[in-house]
Image (spheres, helix red, strand yellow):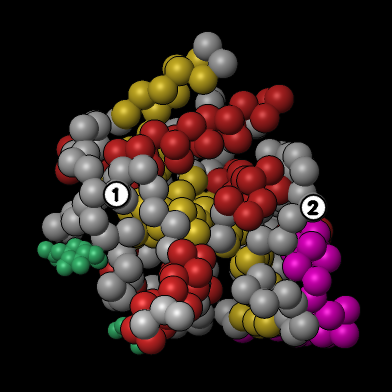
Amino acid sequence: MLPPSLALLLAYLPALALSLKLSPGCGTTPKLITTASTTTPLALTVNGKSRNFFVRLPENYNSTHPYRFIFTLHALGGTATGVITGTGGYVPYYGLPPLINDTVGAIFVAPNGLNNGWGNQGGEDVTFLKQVITTVEADLCVDQNLRFSTGFSYGAAMSYSLACSLGKEIRAVAVLSGNPQISGCEGGTEAVAYYGQHGTSDNVLPISGGRQMRDRFLKNNGCATTTTEAAEPAKGGGGRAKTVYTGCTAGKPVVWVTFDGPHTPTPKGQGESETWSPKETWEFFSQFK
Ligand SMILES: *[C@@H]1O[C@H](CO)[C@@H](O)[C@H](O)[C@H]1NC(C)=O
Ligand SMILES: *[C@@H]1O[C@H](CO)[C@@H](O)[C@H](O)[C@H]1NC(C)=O
């Protein structure tokens, strides 16, 4: 017989182990990543090509605290620096840092695509981003159950592609006006929590592609086929319509937002000065602990 206190401890251990998966960098002093890594990129060679990425350390980085890992991927013609500084049409890191108000916090990772895009030829961008994850997590303390990816346009397509290829290695994605073809979908059979948003007047990447991506994860996530998509917002009203799908596998929700607007990472309601997009993304990501 175990003493009651030890029995209690053992009963709790499996639950703790499942909810927290420490990266190799936990408890070690970072050797690679510093506060300068937001402005000085880190380099990797992948398939003979030189690649780079930036990492934003949380304030007062604590090497024994497991953080979220969030990829913020740029659009076609964009750069990681644009995402970081909030220039070229973005708000910094898709507007997420000021919203993150819980004790988990986040490490933001902004990589550069080849030719300012995410063509993912032969899966090379998935390979690159996997190596970025390994490199960051060898140096920093990450909860490996809390990896996320978001991006706009090509960055959205690549976030979708990561969900397809990495499956349960990725906890959730937020796909902002993406497309299922341009970065591809290798695998694509595992459940990944999925948030998608798309403008009803998008004439760069039509909303039909947004629905196709969503539908893949509705199926993978086992969501009920009975939920009716909310009616699209009226043209000219600046509104949005949100559908939260029911019946999805526990921990694998799907949320879909359509908005009255074009191809943009920063949709706004009528008369509003700030975009609602970061709030929706954070509401989705913050449910995962
Ligand atoms: C660092 O994080 C650990 C684990 O979350 C926590 O117990 C500790 O108090 C933190 N240290 C500081 C200085 O905040
Ligand atoms: C974080 O902010 C949201 C509103 O943006 C609020 O609902 C939530 O309670 C806050 N959480 C914490 C831990 O402060």
Q: Is residue 181 left or right of residue 146?
A: right
Of the 4 image quadrants, the one containing the C terminus is: bottom left
Does residue 102 appear anywhere in the picture?
Answer: yes
Check disc 2: other Cα within 10 Å, few if <14, some if 14-19, many if 20+: some
Q: Height in image: 37 above or below 4?
A: above
Query: Was residue 231 drawn as part of the magenta stretch in this picture?
Result: yes
Front residue of 105/115: it is 105
Q: Residue drawn at (52%, 11%), measured in percent from left and top?
A: 48
SS at mark 1 in the image: loop
The secondary structure that dominates the magenta segment is loop
Magenta-tinted stretch: 214-237
Q: Residue drawn at (44%, 36%), measured in percent from left and top?
A: 134
Front residue of 181/244: it is 244
Q: Height in image: 9 above or below 116?
A: below
Q: Is mark 1 within 8 Å of ligand 1?
A: no
Q: Nearer the viewer, mark 2 or mark 1?
A: 1
SS at mark 2 in the image: loop
Name the mark on residue 189.
2
Amino acid identity at mark 2 = Thr
Q: Position of residue 84 (x, y in %)?
A: 33, 47
| Residue 99 found in image quarter | bottom left
Amino acid identity at mark 1 = Cys
| Ligand number 2: quarter of image | bottom left
Q: Position of residue 261 (x, y in %)?
A: 62, 68
| Residue 119 found in image quarter | top right
Q: CA distance from mark 2 to mark 1?
A: 31 Å
Name the mark on residue 26.
1
Q: Residue drawn at (42%, 79%), measured in percent from left and top?
A: 2
Query: Was residue 227 drawn as part of the magenta stretch in this picture?
Result: yes
